[in-house]
Amino acid sequence: MTYHAIAIDGPAASGKSTMARALAQRLGLVMVNSGAMYRAVTWKILDENIDPKDTAAVIKLLENLDMVCGDDGLFSTISIGGVNPEAFLRRPEINENVSTVSAIPQVRDKLVKMQRDYLQRTHVVMEGRDIGSIVFPDTPFKIYIDADPEVRNQRRSGDGEVDSVEKRDAADSSRATAPLKVADGATVLDTSELNAKQAIEAAIEALKKQGFPILEKAKKKAYQPVEEPHKMMRWIYWLGWLGFGAAYRSLFGLRIVGAEKLIRSGPVLVASNHQSFLDPPLIGNLYQSEMVFFARKTLFKGIGKWLYPQWNAIPIDQEKPDMSSMKTVIRKLKEGWRVLVFPEGARTLDGEIGKAAPGVGLIASKAGVPIQPVRIYGADKALPRGSGRMRLARITVVVGEPIILTAEEFKSYSRKGGYEELTNRIMDAIKEL
Ligand code: DC
């Protein structure tokens, strides 16, 4: 079978990823983020304490690099030396060094080959800098996205990222090998004045004009994310996960928005608003592997005394600040677990988001792990506080972009008032969803 490739190129923060992700979902292809591959190699170089400017050392590392690029049915995945580096790829030190690394011809040779390999087994929409010019020059389906530098800078800082977009563009456009440029036959789309939806419609129009056989949605592969096998669920956790998951989907028409933003492996502090007793298993169902929760101390009685620890619940005393449970959570995160916290502590009384205690800022700052903001809608209607009766209300969970901080940033939050500041930052990210 011949597989199709859609090439999306453009400068940093032009909206390529959003576009490619949406096209993959709409048209039933796999979205491949080629920038993530250059970022992953950069991460490995820095992780090995190699100077990215030391080309000889970088080439040596490449020789034995155990890098595997795959996909989970919808998005590309990367593993380097058995580690999924996803959570680290947008750190400032990666933004700072990735252009140097991606200018090395040997790095490009290796990654371009891996990028072309995708077409052996699936349709792809691949985004990057040289996809239409070098990786798939023969594909008729090419889009070049652009936007004003000012708009792009705003978009990047809106993501909470430290990134010098112009500096990176200058380096990416002026390098000798495969510089960023409009590929022959590409349709140029300026998205400065467009919102995401309009940009995607414009891209679909352009693809139709280029003769793209709009694939049937039905042919789309079921989205089955692959997660770390060593965190396979134990049967007792699985039973709860399955039971609650089935109930949510059938009773409350559970809808998840932004699932592609979930960090699916490695330690993550998941911070959510709190509406009802339904919330912890609701968040647990976003993932295909186990995670850690908090539960009220008073629930650890009778069968609960046995069952809650089986479901990885850590008892917490809601009456007073509970340092021992905080310490347990920080330890769990450091061990690599994903942990759910409700910064507000108690469930909402009126559906609105309440004030947060500074605990979550403290946990995040001490553990130094990525933070994933999540917002729940409708659980307060499905099981209102003070009522034992469930109603058939629709529940929606919205997943936000992860907040990924550097070690220095984490450290800066440990000063006086810092935990509160970080807590507020997390709460604002939840409120925005
Ligand atoms: O798309 P991005 O901003 O995540 O890409 C990160 C860097 O990787 C970018 O500054 C240049 C490099 N890159 C590249 O050289 N060729 C590609 N096809 C994709 C990215």
Image (cartoon, rainbow, N blue to C red):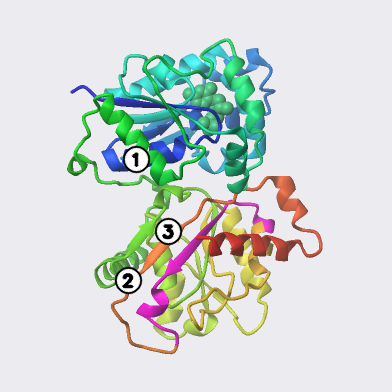
57 or 94, which lies in front? 94
Q: Which mark is residue 290?
A: 3
The number of callouts visible is 3
Q: Nearer the viewer, mark 3 or mark 2?
A: 2
Identity of the amino acid at label 3? Glu
Front in this rendered view, residue 114 or 126: 126
Q: Is residue 301 left or right of residue 269?
A: left
**What's the residue type where badge 2 is placed?**
Arg
| Residue occupied by mark 2 | 394
Q: Is residue 271 left or right of residue 68?
A: right
* Nearest to viewer (mark 3 / mark 1): 1
- The residue lying at 33 percent from left, 61 percent from top is 255
**Identity of the residue drawn at 64% across and 16% down:** 57
Real-space Cα separation, disc 1 to disc 2, in angstroms? 29 Å
As helix, strand or loop, the secondary structure at mark 3 comes to: loop
Q: As drawn, which residue projects farthest toward the top?
A: 176
Q: Is the residue under label 2 in contact with that under label 3 (CB below 8 Å)?
A: no
- The reply to whether the magenta stretch includes residue 370 is yes
Within-10-Å neighbours for mark 2: few <14, some 14–19, many 20+: some
Label 1 sits on a secondary structure element that is helix
How many angstroms separate mark 3 from mark 1 (CA)?
A: 38 Å
Specify the segment rendered in magenta. 365-385
Is residue 1 depicted above or below 234 in this figure?
A: above
